[in-house]
Image (tube, helix red, strand yellow):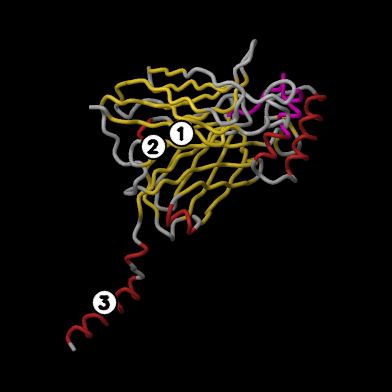
Amino acid sequence: MRYNTLATMGMVLSLVLGWNSADAATDFRIVVVGAKLLPTKTGNRCWDPCMPSARTALSSLTKQLAVLSTGDAWSLTTNRQSSLLKGSKMPDPYLVIKFSNGKRIKTGVAKNTLSPQWGTTERVSLDKGDTVSFLMRDKDLNKDDTIGTKPNVSIPAHLLKKGGTWKLRFHKVYELELLLVKLKTKILRRFVPGLYRVTIRQAEIAKTKPSGSSWDVFRGRPDPFVILTLGKHRIVTPHKKNTHKPIWNYSKDVYLNGDERFEFLVFDRDLSSHDLIGSCFFNQLRFAPLFQRKHFRWNCKSVKDIRIDFARIK
């Protein structure tokens, strides 16, 4: 009887206080990956002063993009119309994220681009009742233009449960991409400084360029190689000929403490200038999603899957 009474009191307190152990706040690593923006602002005006012919062309491109779904459609359309973008000043975007629990994230300013990549990271505790507000602006000398706002957005339940990629679309922001990594899992354990054997294993490359054309002439496949930068360390793989699924297994031993800027670029080797297949970065290596603290897998633009191992030697 005494046990039942205590149990009943506990249930009553839970109902009164609105408390449930399953609703406790969870720590996440938030990565502001990047965004894709529409070429013109409200009123079909250029983000910065431009010629009337450029304004007309960019306005037409904005109208095309506005009716398309997010994702590859943006890259495909803008690449086809790349001549319209040349010679026109693009916005200098930055993003401010405010959480209802008081936490705030602000990115740096990305210069002259419709596709900013920030890689800004922050640790935030989130509960299912928390909301998020977004403000993206174009940095100007006098008054910053507003690119888009999205206030009081509820965080999707599946992200609070397992983490993952969160994509949003609002106003002149065609697509904003965030990564929520749930801490105290096999992802993002504490990075241990030491000597590491970094091995660039393999990748999978998209069948065609974003424009739909082949990587090489006569429907040829790419000849991919990787440039990996870890702080002051630089690792360059040899190229693999004529393949969408290169396997390098190329290693180098470097000392890492986790604070290094982590960037990789994948190129298609050509005789004159090499085509960039994809590039991504994280402000610090410790914030990159390393499964079991040593296996990195990621997709970035036309790089559909890249695998890099970090094996601690000592």
Asked whether 261 or 276 is in front, the reply is 276
Q: Secondary structure at mark 1?
A: strand
Q: Are marks 2 and 1 in contact (CB under 8 Å)?
A: yes
Report the residue marked by disc 1. 307
Question: Which residues lie in the magenta part?
Answer: 77-92
Counting residues from the start of the chain, the first of labels 2 and 3 encountered is: 3
Counting residues from the start of the chain, the first of labels 2 and 1 encountered is: 2
Q: Nearer the viewer, mark 2 or mark 3?
A: 2
- Give the left or right position of residue 162, taking residue 37 as reference: left
Residue 258 image-quadrant placement: top left
Report the residue marked by disc 3. 10
Q: Secondary structure at mark 3?
A: helix
Counting residues from the start of the chain, the first of labels 3 and 1 encountered is: 3
Residue 83 colored magenta? yes
What numbered label is drawn on residue 295? 2
- Above or below 233: residue 310: below
Residue 177 colored magenta? no
Asked whether 25 or 236 is in front, the reply is 236
Horizontal and vertical percent for residue 98? 46, 46
What's the residue at 41%, 46% (across, down)? 181
